[in-house]
């Protein structure tokens, strides 16, 4: 059994359960991922509440602020302070004053559920934001893509314990997986990853994101908003996600699994013969 990941507050709870299998029922201890409300506060003004895994919340606050377009550049985020309570957390974000003024006009007051990517927006225009086309982006070989897919499972300690969290991984051609963030919400995992790489000073145009979830519209929107030009997902895309990827110039790969993948948008960044991954 993997060790429980450590954080400022518990990430895993244990419950006594009855586990049924053919042949009988046994009582056992089961490990379950924690999920807490995280309030995002900008200059002492609550902006919204997301349900999330209580880890890497500084990364989450930075990634959310950028991927939601609340600021245009990382330098406009002046600071992040995370405060933990028994069953909740607050992420207090300081931003440039001109950004805070604009932020007040689109302030959210609705709770963001674990699976919610566009919670709190009030109009279609707010939900489907205009995204600038991404830049040149990386060149990724088929072999590198599938090596990352194969390696990702070993980089998910919380999911190994609970089986209930998503992961977003940052992969740089020639270097493999450089960072992974986990969360009960797929959008949160992506925001945490974006925040982690921005805080480290990484060039988001130089690598790609590998997601354990489906490639829904908001996952493409968040990635494109910060200049990520290549997204690979283990599960399916949605039609709106494909349209946005094609419009924004993002390479979108889905059903990315062992010895298979499907390219839905801008295949020019993925090079190599797919047959190289077939068994000999």
Image: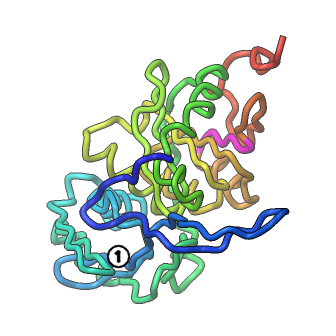
Label 1 residue SS:
strand
For residue 79, side relative to residue 33 (left or right): left
Region rendered in magenta:
249-255
Colouring scheme, one of rainbow, by chain, secondary structure, one colour? rainbow
Q: How many marks?
A: 1
Near-viewer residue (22 or 208): 22
- The residue identified by callout 1 is 38
For residue 227, side relative to residue 66 (left or right): right
Task: Judge whether residue 105 can be spotted in this image.
Answer: yes
Near-viewer residue (166 or 236): 166
Q: Quadrant of residue 72?
A: bottom left
The residue positioned 81% from the left and 17% from the top of the image is 275
Q: Residue 57 location in percent, x, y?
A: 31, 62
Vertical placement of residue 242 versus 55, above or below: above
Q: Quadrant of residue 274?
A: top right
Vertical placement of residue 123 versus 167, above or below: below
The residue positioned 19% from the left and 63% from the top of the image is 80
The residue positioned 25% from the left and 40% from the top of the image is 200
Task: Give the residue furthest to the bottom.
Answer: 109
Q: Residue 124 location in percent, x, y?
A: 60, 78
Question: Principal SS element in the magenta part?
Answer: strand
The residue positioned 71% from the left and 52% from the top of the image is 242
Vertical placement of residue 58 versus 109, above or below: above
Q: Residue 156 location in percent, x, y?
A: 49, 45
Q: Quadrant of the C terminus?
A: top right
Answer few, some or many: residues within 10 Å of disc 1's Cα (few below 14, many 20 plus, some between 14 and 19): many
- Please tell me whether residue 197 belongs to the stretch shown in magenta: no
């Amino acid at each position: 059994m993997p060790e429980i990941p450590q954080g400022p507050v518990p990430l895993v709870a244990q419950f006594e359960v009855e586990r049924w299998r053919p042949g009988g029922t046994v009582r056992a201890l089961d490990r379950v991922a924690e999920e807490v409300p995280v309030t995002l506060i900008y200059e002492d003004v609550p902006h919204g509440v997301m349900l999330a895994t209580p880890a890497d919340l500084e990364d989450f606050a930075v990634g959310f602020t950028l991927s939601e377009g609340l600021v245009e550049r990382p330098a406009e985020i002046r600071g992040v302070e995370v405060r933990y309570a028994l069953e909740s957390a607050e992420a207090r974000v300081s931003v440039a004053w001109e950004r805070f003024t604009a932020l007040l006009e689109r302030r959210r007051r609705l709770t963001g559920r674990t699976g919610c990517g566009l919670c709190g927006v009030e109009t279609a225009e707010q939900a489907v934001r205009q995204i600038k086309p991404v830049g040149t982006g990386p060149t990724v070989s088929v072999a590198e893509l599938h090596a990352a897919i194969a390696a990702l499972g070993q980089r998910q300690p919380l999911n190994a314990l609970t089986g209930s969290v998503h992961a977003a991984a940052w992969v740089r051609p020639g270097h493999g997986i450089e960072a992974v963030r986990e969360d009960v919400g797929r959008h949160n995992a992506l925001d945490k990853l974006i925040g982690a790489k921005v805080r480290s000073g990484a060039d988001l145009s130089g690598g790609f994101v590998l997601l354990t979830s489906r490639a829904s519209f908001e996952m493409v929107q968040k990635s494109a908003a910060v200049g990520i030009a290549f997204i690979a997902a283990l599960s399916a895309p949605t039609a709106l996600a494909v349209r946005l990827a094609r419009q924004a110039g993002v390479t979108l790969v889905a059903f990315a699994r062992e010895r298979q993948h499907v390219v839905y948008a801008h295949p020019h960044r993925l090079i190599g013969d797919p047959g190289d991954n077939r068994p000999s």
